[in-house]
């Protein structure tokens, strides 16, 4: 093989045709050294048998030791993994993109390791390639994983087709590897993320409140629950709120701010967001305001069915209507009544979490 083509890149301005050149090489079965935030890796097309055989040969790695898949978005994990647990989604939500590799059950039987790197060059190369990309560390088996380009190219010059020099890696330590194929999960390698941080993130409960625009009802519910948890000095619960409509970035309504201010709660910094599949799948309890919200949630993530409840189910008010009606456009006293129902429900929720 001829000498490896080397490109020098600016990690702070990761643009240029070289990204597409690297992606084209990977897609066609070539091997490319790319930076990640942890160590340098050798990127290859997972679907190209000759590329994978060549990668094993170059690294001197045993065939039974599989390469981890690197993806450019969390959603792509659904294409490759099966039976993804709530804990897995929690860890992805907390640490991706970042130095975490998770082992999951594969859709093609067996297991698969997956990581979403926190490096723009790596993410763009993976995206442009349009194929599943494996990316083991750019070193010979048994040698230390390279944290600088000089270390990466030392034993691989002439053995790979292209190498991207982006200086030293930002973290300089390999990813932490967690096996989530069984309970309890196992930390196979403690790397850039500490064991205690993994344990804390996996154990933390996630409560998600969902309404229509994420500007009043779900804002009230989150604010009230956050306030109660703070007073109880509990830090083992993460509280989220979102809406089913595209109103991302809007603040809470003026009436919502007013009624919560009377409770001593300031939500002036709230910004609305749309509910996502990721939010739903990492939530232990999903509390919606109306039946239509439940229907929308289940359209996005049918597998969360047993974790979705109408918030008013937790209220003691003897009302056959379990919907908490939208106060948008109503006077402040309607907001106050809405807050009372939500507050009572939140008090019941505190007792079960």
Image (cartoon, rainbow, N blue to C red):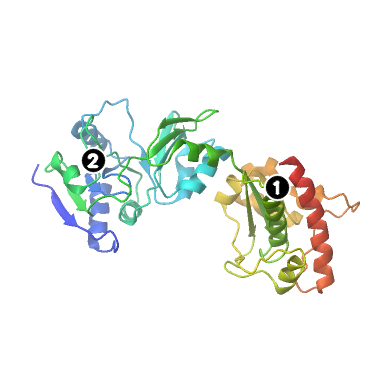
Q: Is residue 37 left or right of residue 91?
A: left
**Residue 224 image offset from top left, x and y in percent:** 72, 57
**Residue 315 image offset from top left, x and y in percent:** 83, 50
Question: Callout 1: few (<14), some (14-19), or many (20+) C-alpha neighbours within 10 Å?
Answer: few
**Residue 93 image offset from top left, x and y in percent:** 51, 48
Label 1 sits on residue: 232
Mark 2 and mark 1 residues within 8 Å of each other at the beta carbon: no
Q: Is residue 40 left or right of residue 196?
A: left
Q: For mark 1, give the secondary structure.
A: loop
Label 2 sits on residue: 138
Please state which of residues 69 and 183 is positioned toward the viewer in this rendering. 183
Q: Is residue 45 left or right of residue 99?
A: left
Q: Is residue 301 left or right of residue 27?
A: right
Do we see residue 155 in this rendering?
A: yes
Q: Is residue 261 above or below residue 87?
A: below
Q: For mark 2, give the secondary structure.
A: loop
- Residue at x-position 30% and y-position 55%: 121
**Quarter of the N terminus within the rendering:** top left
- Residue at x-position 75% and y-position 46%: 349
Q: Is residue 305 above or below residue 294?
A: above
- Residue at x-position 74% and y-position 46%: 350
Disc nearer the start of the sequence (2/1): 2
Q: CA distance from mark 2 to mark 1?
A: 49 Å
């Amino acid at each position: 093989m001829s000498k490896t083509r080397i490109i020098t890149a600016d990690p702070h301005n990761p643009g240029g045709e070289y990204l597409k050149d690297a992606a084209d090489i990977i897609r066609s079965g070539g091997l490319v050294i790319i930076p990640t935030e942890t160590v340098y890796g050798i990127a290859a097309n997972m679907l190209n048998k000759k590329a994978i055989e060549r990668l094993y040969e170059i690294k001197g790695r045993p065939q039974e030791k599989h390469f981890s898949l690197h993806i450019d978005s969390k959603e792509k994990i659904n294409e490759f993994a099966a039976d993804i647990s709530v804990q897995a989604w929690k860890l992805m939500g907390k640490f991706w993109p970042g130095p975490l590799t998770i082992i999951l059950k594969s859709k093609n039987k067996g297991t698969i390791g997956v990581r979403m790197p926190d490096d723009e060059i790596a993410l763009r190369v993976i995206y442009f390639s349009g194929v599943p990309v494996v990316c083991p560390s750019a070193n010979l088996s048994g040698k230390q994983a390279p944290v600088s380009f000089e270390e990466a190219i030392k034993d691989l010059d002439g053995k790979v087709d292209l190498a991207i020099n982006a200086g030293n890696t930002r973290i300089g330590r390999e990813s932490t590897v967690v096996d989530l194929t069984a309970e309890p999960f196992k930390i196979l390698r403690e790397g850039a993320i500490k064991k205690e941080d993994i344990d804390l993130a996996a154990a933390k409960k996630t409560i998600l409140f969902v309404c229509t625009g994420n500007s009043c009802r779900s804002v009230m519910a989150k604010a009230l629950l956050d306030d109660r948890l703070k007073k109880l000095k509990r830090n083992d619960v993460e509280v989220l709120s979102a809406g089913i409509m595209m109103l991302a970035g809007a603040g809470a309504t003026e009436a919502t701010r007013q009624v919560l201010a009377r409770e001593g709660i300031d939500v002036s910094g709230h910004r609305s967001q749309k509910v996502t599949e990721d939010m739903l799948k990492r939530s232990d309890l999903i509390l919606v305001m109306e039946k239509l919200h439940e229907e929308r949630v289940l359209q996005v993530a049918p597998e969360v069915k047993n974790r979705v409840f109408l918030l008013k189910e937790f209220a003691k008010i003897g009302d056959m209507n379990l919907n908490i009606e939208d106060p948008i456009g109503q006077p402040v006293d309607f907001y106050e009544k809405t807050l009372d129902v939500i507050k009572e429900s939140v008090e019941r929720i505190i007792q079960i979490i």
